[in-house]
Amino acid sequence: MEPIYTLVSSARRWVDLTMYELEDTHAEQLLAADADRGVDVRVILNAAYTGSANDSAFAYLHGHGVHVTWAGPRYALTHQKTLVVDGLVAAIMTLNWTSRYYADTRDVAVIDRAPEDVSAIATTFDADYGGAQVDPPAGADLVWSPTTSLPDLLGLINGATHELDVENEEMANAEVTAAIPAAARRGVNVELCMTDSSSWATAFGELVAAGVHVRLYSPDAALYIHAKVIVRDPGARDEEAFVGSQNFSTESLRYNRELGIVLDGASLIDQLRTMIQRDAGGAAPWSG
């Protein structure tokens, strides 16, 4: 979290934070310190489902000069995890700001300085903060729920020709759970690493039957896979990766407010691929 904390403390004019779950007292103190020195700090916290978990943070921020609001009812959940600082830089995250999970949970954050991305995220924040309808701008490479995420992610998966590396917390959306084994059946080497759950047993069986290499951590393992990452065809000229808040569930892809990003930088893609492969190396094959 140090790079994220540093970003928060670097603010000179304004900070916008959209967060599904906020239970990190240090982060809350940094936001309050920003507000105390005149930075305009605005925060959207999810209310549905996690409202009680966010109550303490909401009260603290409200009492320390932060403009904090509950996410409106336009979306089933506001599951987005995004920070924008001074209109210059954004952090697009898979992680909640919940400090008790930092030490044992696999998550990823992308620091994005592309002006068109930062502007698109800020524009969408303004609308969501005010409860207004918005068609989120695509920026250079953004993936929004509920508008574009399902076709964008299916396009990424369906475009794989030789390798697909995946981490996610859920495996529930029928279109995604059809696209991944279809990639394996056409000869793509598909590596999937997750935390095991009986909820996804049927999907795991179908994936393995199609030739997907499914490797799982038990729910009580030392590492919990919370990241939402796809790496497609690393090393190829058209290699791409995805990082975002979207789980492979219909709720996440069609009804929630979520944000992810498509990456095409070789260095970033190699880091993500290495991460997934190392995680998979510590997990066990699905055994049914």
Image: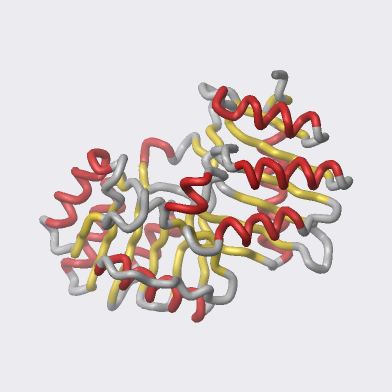
Q: Give the residue furthest to the right.
A: 187
Q: Give the residue furthest to the top.
A: 288
Q: Residue at x 45, y 71 (%)?
A: 136
Q: Camera-side residue: 54 or 177? A: 177
Q: Give the residue furthest to the left.
A: 63
Q: Is residue 125 left or right of residue 181?
A: left
Question: Where in the figure is residue 240, as x and y percent of width and height?
Answer: 71, 62
Q: Camera-side residue: 251 or 113? A: 251
The mark total stands at: 0
Q: Residue at x 71, y 24 (%)?
A: 286
Say above or below: 211 vs 89: above
The colour style of the image is: secondary structure
Q: Is residue 273 left or right of residue 29?
A: right
Question: Where in the figure is residue 10, as x and y percent of width and height?
Answer: 35, 70
When asked about the image quadrant of residue 154, the answer is bottom right
Q: Residue at x 62, y 64 (%)?
A: 262
Question: Where in the figure is residue 62, as x and y percent of width and height?
Answer: 14, 57
Question: Where in the figure is residue 51, as x and y percent of width and height?
Answer: 25, 43
Q: Camera-side residue: 219 or 26? A: 219
Q: Give the residue furthest to the bottom.
A: 115
When asked about the image quadrant of residue 207, the answer is top right
Q: Residue at x 56, y 63 (%)?
A: 261
Q: Is residue 150 left or right of residue 211?
A: left
